[in-house]
Image (cartoon, rainbow, N blue to C red):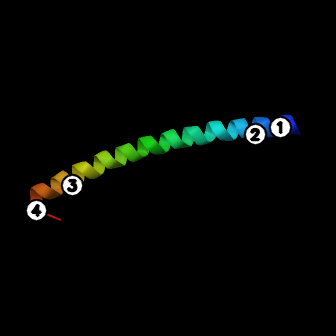
Amino acid sequence: MNKQLIISLFFLCISSKMLFSAEMEAGQNLRKKSRRVQSQDLKYGID
């Protein structure tokens, strides 16, 4: 039982790290897109 708990915690840690890095990448991509959109809006004078 104890070994199972440790293994499940280990996998949980790995999966949460993978999720976190994926979210960080997605967040950076979103920020890049929003910056691009903002610069286009400034060009056309849209708030």
Residue at the far right in the pictured view: 1
Instruction: Tell which circle, 3 or 2, labels the residue nearer the N-terminal end.
Output: 2
* Left or right: 45, with 19 as reference point: left
Query: Residue 13, position in %: x, y?
Result: 65, 39
Q: Are marks 3 and 2 in contact (CB under 8 Å)?
A: no
User: Looking at the picture, which amino acid does disc 4 mark?
Assistant: Gly
Query: Residue 17, position in %: x, y?
Result: 57, 38
Q: Quadrant of residue 15?
A: top right
Disc 4: which residue: 45
Q: Are marks 2 and 4 in contact (CB under 8 Å)?
A: no
Q: CA distance from mark 3 to mark 1?
A: 50 Å
Q: CA distance from mark 1 to mark 2?
A: 6 Å
Disc 2: which residue: 8
Q: How busy is the neighbourhood of tag 1: few (under 14 within 10 Å), some, or many (20 plus)?
A: few
Q: Are marks 1 and 2 in contact (CB under 8 Å)?
A: yes
Q: How busy is the neighbourhood of tag 4: few (under 14 within 10 Å), some, or many (20 plus)?
A: few
For label 1, the SS is: helix
Residue pictured at 56% horizontal, 38% vertical = 18
Above or below — where is 32 with respect to 6? below
Disc 3: which residue: 38
Image quadrant for the N terminus?
Answer: top right
* Left or right: 11, with 42 as reference point: right
User: Looking at the picture, which amino acid does disc 1 mark?
Assistant: Gln
Q: Are marks 4 and 3 in contact (CB under 8 Å)?
A: no
User: Looking at the picture, which amino acid does disc 3 mark?
Assistant: Gln
Disc 1: which residue: 4
User: Looking at the picture, which amino acid does disc 2 mark?
Assistant: Ser
